[in-house]
Amino acid sequence: MMYVPNFRKKTAKEKRKFVRVREYRLVKYREPDNSQKLSFVRDYSEGGILFHCKEDLSPGRILEMELNFPELENPVKVKTQVLRTKKLNRVEGFEVAAVFLEIGEELIRVLKRKNRGSSGKSQIG
């Protein structure tokens, strides 16, 4: 069963819908032309992911991603949509923010567990 994130309404003080977990890990992503790329994640939440890549991905682009978590036996596949990209100055490449379009219940459980255990490493707002 796939889970589509339920975005809650933001308050005036709140900028993020979900708590971000700052954790670096490898990620594979596949574009609609079926080419596969390897990159790394900077942070993620129940709502989306921030990762680095060499390509300037245009907003609206749909990507299929594969994430590995030590808690899970198999990689988790998610469908994302690029929200924005930012050219990085200190290193070659781009920072890409993408929203999850579809994620599995298993990944939601892992993300909620990480949010509870990440005091000080995650941020709201």
Image (cartoon, rainbow, N blue to C red):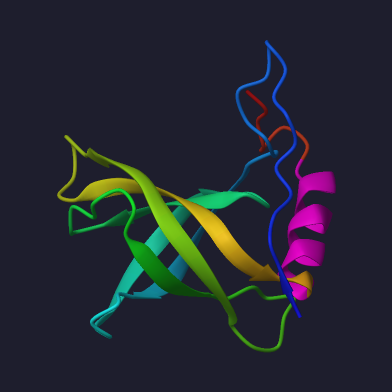
Q: Residue at x 21, y 39 (%)?
A: 88
Which stretch did the figure color magenta?
Answer: 106-118
Q: Position of residue 73 (x, y in %)?
A: 70, 88
> In the figure, is residue 94 to the left or right of 44?
left
The N terminus is located in which quarter? bottom right
- Residue furthest top as drawn: 12
Number of numbered markers: 0
Q: Is residue 115 above or below residue 111?
A: above
Q: Position of residue 36 (x, y in %)?
A: 29, 82
Q: Position of residue 28 (x, y in %)?
A: 40, 75
> In the figure, is residue 44 to the left or right of 26?
right
Q: Residue at x 73, y 29 (%)?
A: 9
Q: Is residue 2 above or below residue 115?
A: below
Residue 115 is one of the magenta-drawn residues: yes
> In the figure, is residue 30 to the left or right of 20?
left
Q: Position of residue 62 (x, y in %)?
A: 37, 65
